[in-house]
Image (tube, grey):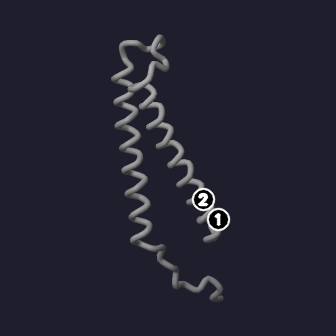
Amino acid sequence: MSPKIKNIVNATRFSFTSLVVILYFVVSFLFLFTNVWGDLLPNARLTIGLILLFFGAFRFYIAYRRYKSKKNHPHKQNNTNENVE
């Protein structure tokens, strides 16, 4: 895979991961602090909200750790000659 395509894939993955983490936090805050879906799950709102909040924090931690490890360890270049006959 060429470096240009890898950069596009990494940027897309980062954007999707950020969007999913934000979605987890928004839905968890909706469950915890508003009356949205109050009639659907009246007894389990606190539990579901906390699970989504912790899972969103876990996803954020994994994404942050992956970002930091890529930033501190740049990709190694291959020193092999592929055109050697």
Q: Position of residue 75 (x, y in %)?
A: 48, 73
At a point 38% along the width and 38% down the height, the residue shown is 55
Q: Position of residue 44 (x, y in %)?
A: 37, 17
Residue lying at the far front in this picture: please name it.
34
Is 29 on the left-hand or right-hand side of 79? left
At a point 56% along the width and 52% down the height, the residue shown is 15
Q: CA distance from mark 1 to mark 2?
A: 6 Å
Q: Position of residue 27 (x, y in %)?
A: 47, 31
Q: Are marks 1 and 2 in contact (CB under 8 Å)?
A: yes
Q: Quadrant of the N terminus?
A: bottom right
Amino acid type of the residue that numbered disc 1 sits on in the rendered structure = Ile
Q: Which residue is mark 1?
A: 5
Residue lying at the far bottom in this picture: please name it.
85
In this picture, is 18 found above or below 72?
Answer: above
Structural crowding at the residue carrying mark 2, measured as other residues with C-alpha within 10 Å and reported as few (<14), some (14–19) or many (≥20)? few
At a point 47% along the width and 77% down the height, the residue shown is 76
In this picture, is 51 found above or below 80?
Answer: above
At a point 52% along the width and 85% down the height, the residue shown is 79
Is 84 on the left-hand or right-hand side of 38? right
Most foreground residue, 80 or 31: 31
Structural crowding at the residue carrying mark 1, measured as other residues with C-alpha within 10 Å and reported as few (<14), some (14–19) or many (≥20)? few
Q: Quadrant of residue 28?
A: top left
Secondary structure of residue under mark 1? helix
Q: Which residue is mark 2?
A: 9
Secondary structure of residue under mark 2? helix
Most foreground residue, 34 or 16: 34
